């Protein structure tokens, strides 16, 4: 893939958006998907502007083993807000009678509400401002209900010095220690200064 990416990027930077580049782009899109193609192009463009480790990680490179966590109480309002942005009106989130008749035994919040705390941890704490997820692999282990206190936790397992990419172990757990989500994530941190 790297030869094709380099060729594609070289054509863009050398020739601009000409017909030859557009042909290469459609080949790349078919092979890897338009979203991945644009993510890779954007990262390559950012990397071409970078040089030393301090330029790649202006706020310092995360250390292997470094952890961060955030906690919050989940509310019924979170279900409503997530429904507003996602359209998820599953009766498991709203209808007590229907939800009680399932193995959950009552109302549960959407998985997106549970995983959202990890977005906050990576964007605010570790790796920090400018960070976005490139890839996540999460397994939901137990339900979260309105009123539950959840904690999102990340641990750095790998940090590249040449590119602002980190690999993380991720976990969300309840106040009693029950793991409700676990998995891994790959993040990209754009070089923004903390305010």
Image (cartoon, grey):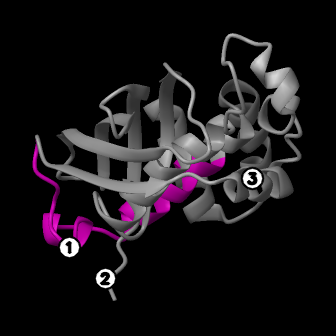
Task: Tell me, for residue 87, which label it has, or none.
Answer: none
Q: Name which of mark 1 and mark 3 comes first in the sequence.
A: 1
Quickly name the residue at label 2. 194
Q: Name the side, left or right, on which 11 lies relative to 48.
A: right
Categorize mark 3 by other alpha carbons within 10 Å: few (<14), some (14-19), many (20+): some
Q: Using the image as rendered, state which of residue 43 and residue 178 is in the foreground.
A: 178
Task: Tell me, for residue 82, which label it has, or none.
Answer: 3
Q: Which residue sits at x=85%, y=40%?
A: 88
Q: Using the image as rendered, state which of residue 88 and residue 143 is in the foreground.
A: 143
Q: Nearer the viewer, mark 1 or mark 3?
A: 3
Residue 53 occupies quadrant: bottom left
Q: Which residue sits at x=79%, y=24%?
A: 99
Q: Using the image as rendered, state which of residue 110 and residue 33 is in the foreground.
A: 110
Q: Magenta stretch: residue 137 in it? A: no
Q: Magenta stretch: residue 62 in it? A: yes
Q: Does residue 23 appear in the picture of this structure?
A: yes
Categorize mark 2 by other alpha carbons within 10 Å: few (<14), some (14-19), many (20+): few
Q: Are marks 2 and 1 in contact (CB under 8 Å)?
A: yes
Residue 172 sits above or below residue 71 on the image: above
Residue 3 point in image, percent of width and height: 46, 33
Quarter occupied by the C terminus? bottom left
Q: Name which of mark 3 and mark 2 comes first in the sequence.
A: 3
Where does the magenta region start and end?
A: 38-64
Q: Are marks 3 and 2 in contact (CB under 8 Å)?
A: no
């Amino acid at each position: 893939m790297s030869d094709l990416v380099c060729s594609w990027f070289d054509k863009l930077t050398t020739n601009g958006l000409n017909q030859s580049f557009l042909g290469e782009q459609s080949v790349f899109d078919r092979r890897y998907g338009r979203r991945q193609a644009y993510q890779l192009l954007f990262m390559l463009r950012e990397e071409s502007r970078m040089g030393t480790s301090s330029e790649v990680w202006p706020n310092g490179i995360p250390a292997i083993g470094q952890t961060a966590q955030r906690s919050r109480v989940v509310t019924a309002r979170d279900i409503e807000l997530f429904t507003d942005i996602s359209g998820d009106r599953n009766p498991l989130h709203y209808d007590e009678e229907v939800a009680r008749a399932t193995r959950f035994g009552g109302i549960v919040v959407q998985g997106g509400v549970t995983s959202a705390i990890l977005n906050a941890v990576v964007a605010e704490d570790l790796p920090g401002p400018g960070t976005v997820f490139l890839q996540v692999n999460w397994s939901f282990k137990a339900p979260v209900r309105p009123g539950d206190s959840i904690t999102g936790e990340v641990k750095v397992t790998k940090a590249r010095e040449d590119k602002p990419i980190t690999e993380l172990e991720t976990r969300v757990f309840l106040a009693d220690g029950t793991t409700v989500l676990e998995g891994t994530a790959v993040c990209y941190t754009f070089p923004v200064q903390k305010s």
